[in-house]
Image (tube, coloured by chain):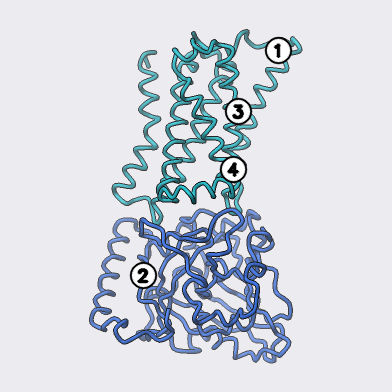
């Protein structure tokens, strides 16, 4: 694939989940409880995109494929896109915009609290994703801010785990992948910190 | 909600008959589209209709069988329809023992002959916040319980569901403590609303819904209605149910539908009726308060959740 085609191709692939649920909703093929299916589906794809985004740096370090880096911002924004749809599903299909109820839910239900916190933390990241914002903030501050995605991903997995009735297999799978992705970072950080053969220098510096 | 519906509430037989035609054709349609619903064998005699039935529109058959929690087959609600075909439902025996005068092991064919089947269209409210309207076929559980002559010391009934590892991929994982165990007070089990279910939608009970026999307790959350039952035990103490074992803080022994008592993690005030867009308010005892509230007179329903 030519270099220039990679990003548009990934963009289109990233829209496939939306297409699947849109098609399914239109043709009533999402089963007995389509509203729940769409809500869950958007949540699942938020998690998927969060993990894929977090996998970019490890993939680049392990394979040396610098092209991966050029997809990171777009994938991160897709995580925000699906998170927004997931939140919209909750506000509409679950609560029908009953704001009082929603407020009580956020305070009273830990899995909602955690989900809302994750979304709230995601908003500033999406808002500062432009080159202009990076310039304005400066690389260091921008990077410090965007490290909150680690916390967001942890909150997202906890949100999923606390929602599940009894079968923790799926949340554990997500948690395991996340632990691996964050564990690699910790390992590399320790290697750099104690000057033990860092794999590559200036690995996490954002592109100007 | 009324135990005896007003004459105006009873559907005229000719419309009722056409409804069945409609249902048959929609089942056919479902078959053509998914190929997942095998043609169900029907019973010889047409079942009588019960005054306990609701006149709400039944949930389509493909949803009743295609969207259910039957964790022995997997935790996805599509798993039972996917895997339950392998469940062996013949031969099938049910053991009734414990604190009874005449313990017995009955063959399913004998149970089918115990009483004429009636159709009971019940609401089902799942603890997860969705609900259905289901036309069950069966007879009051008490018909079966009476046969073994429970002793005065029997105060509770325990239901044990089948474990067939070769047919049930879900039991390989200890999501719950198998076999699935449920339980009720004896007077709850003997209540005329508590149905021993042998069929669904005018046909033999599909495997995905707990064939060959299950119970339906319409004023309790769905998980209280044990499926594919192999043993009914009469005991003196409240049996420890599978869900109480899994999460004692979340699932109580009674588990009566109660909009005022939330699940610790989500609200129970409203429910989504399958097929509807807006949620509807959940009713105390799932709308059966008139029939069953007396069973709990003077009890603190928040503590006894």
Discs 3/4, front: 3
Pick whichever of labels 3 and 4 is earlier in the sequence. Answer: 3
Give the answer, above or below, for where A123 lies relative to B122: above
Q: Residue at x 45, y 26 (%)?
A: A77
Q: Which residue is labeled 1 in the image?
A: A192
Q: Which residue is labeled 2 in the image?
A: B58
Q: Chain of mark 1?
A: A
Give the CA distance from mark 2 to mark 4. 34 Å
Place of residue B62 in the rendered image (x, y in percent of width and height, measured from the top left): 37, 62
Q: Chain of mark 3?
A: A
Place of residue B219 in the rendered image (x, y in percent of width and height, measured from the top left): 52, 73
Task: Please rate how many residues cluster around mark 1, counting C-alpha atoms within 10 Å: few if below 14, some from 14 to 19, many from 20.
Answer: some
Residue B301 appears in the figure:
yes
Q: Secondary structure at mark 4?
A: helix
Q: Secondary structure at mark 3?
A: helix
Give the CA distance from mark 3 to mark 2. 47 Å
Pick whichever of labels 1 and 4 is earlier in the sequence. Answer: 4
Q: Secondary structure at mark 1?
A: helix
Discs 3/1, front: 3
Pick out the residue farthest to the front.
A100
Instruction: Say if labels 2 and 4 share a chain.
Output: no
Task: Please rate how many residues cluster around mark 3, counting C-alpha atoms within 10 Å: few if below 14, some from 14 to 19, many from 20.
Answer: some
């Amino acid at each position: 694939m030519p270099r220039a085609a990679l990003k548009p191709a990934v963009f289109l692939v990233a829209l496939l989940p939306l297409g699947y649920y849109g098609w399914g909703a239109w043709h009533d093929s999402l089963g007995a409880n389509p509203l729940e299916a769409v809500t869950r589906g958007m949540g699942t794809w938020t998690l998927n995109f969060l993990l894929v985004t977090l996998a970019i740096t490890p993939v680049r370090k392990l394979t040396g494929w610098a092209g991966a880096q050029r997809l990171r911002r777009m994938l991160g924004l897709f995580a925000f896109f699906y998170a927004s749809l997931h939140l919209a599903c909750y506000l509409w299909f679950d609560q029908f915009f009953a704001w009082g109820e929603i407020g009580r839910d956020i305070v009273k239900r830990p899995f909602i609290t955690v989900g809302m916190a994750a979304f709230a933390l995601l908003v500033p990241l999406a808002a500062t994703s432009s080159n202009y914002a990076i310039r304005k903030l400066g690389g260091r501050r921008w990077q410090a801010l965007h490290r909150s995605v680690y916390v967001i991903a942890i909150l997202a997995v906890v949100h999923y785990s606390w929602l599940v009735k009894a079968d923790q297999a799926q949340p554990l799978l997500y948690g395991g992948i996340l632990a691996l992705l964050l564990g690699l970072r910790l390992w590399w950080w320790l290697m750099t910190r104690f000057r033990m053969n860092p794999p590559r220098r200036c690995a996490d510096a954002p592109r100007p | 909600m009324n135990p005896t519906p007003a004459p105006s509430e009873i559907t005229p037989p000719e419309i009722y008959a056409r409804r069945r035609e409609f249902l048959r054709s929609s089942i056919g349609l479902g078959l053509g589209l998914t190929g997942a619903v095998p043609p169900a064998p029907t019973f010889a005699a047409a079942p009588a209709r019960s005054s306990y039935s609701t006149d709400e529109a039944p949930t389509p058959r493909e949803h009743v069988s295609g969207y259910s929690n039957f964790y022995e087959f997997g935790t996805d609600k599509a798993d039972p329809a996917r895997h339950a075909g392998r469940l062996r439902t013949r031969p099938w025996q049910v053991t009734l023992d414990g604190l009874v005068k005449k313990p017995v092991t009955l063959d399913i064919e004998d149970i089918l002959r115990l009483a004429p089947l009636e159709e009971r269209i019940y609401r089902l409210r799942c603890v997860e916040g969705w609900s259905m309207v289901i036309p069950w076929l069966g007879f009051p559980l008490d018909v079966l319980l009476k046969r073994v002559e429970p002793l005065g010391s029997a105060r509770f009934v325990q239901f044990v569901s089948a474990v067939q590892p070769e047919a049930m991929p879900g039991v390989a994982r200890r999501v719950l403590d198998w076999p699935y165990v449920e339980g009720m007070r004896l007077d709850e089990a003997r209540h005329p609303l508590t149905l021993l279910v042998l069929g669904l939608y005018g046909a033999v009970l599909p495997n995905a819904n707990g064939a060959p026999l299950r119970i339906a307790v319409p004023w309790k959350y769905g998980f209280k209605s044990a499926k594919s039952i192999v043993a009914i035990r009469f005991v003196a103490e409240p049996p420890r149910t599978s869900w109480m074992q899994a999460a004692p803080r979340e699932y109580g022994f009674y588990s009566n539908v109660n909009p005022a008592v939330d699940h610790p993690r989500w609200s129970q005030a409203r429910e989504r009726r399958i097929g509807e867009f807006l949620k509807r308010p959940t009713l105390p005892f799932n709308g059966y308060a008139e029939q069953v509230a007396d069973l709990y007179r003077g009890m603190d329903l928040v503590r006894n959740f």
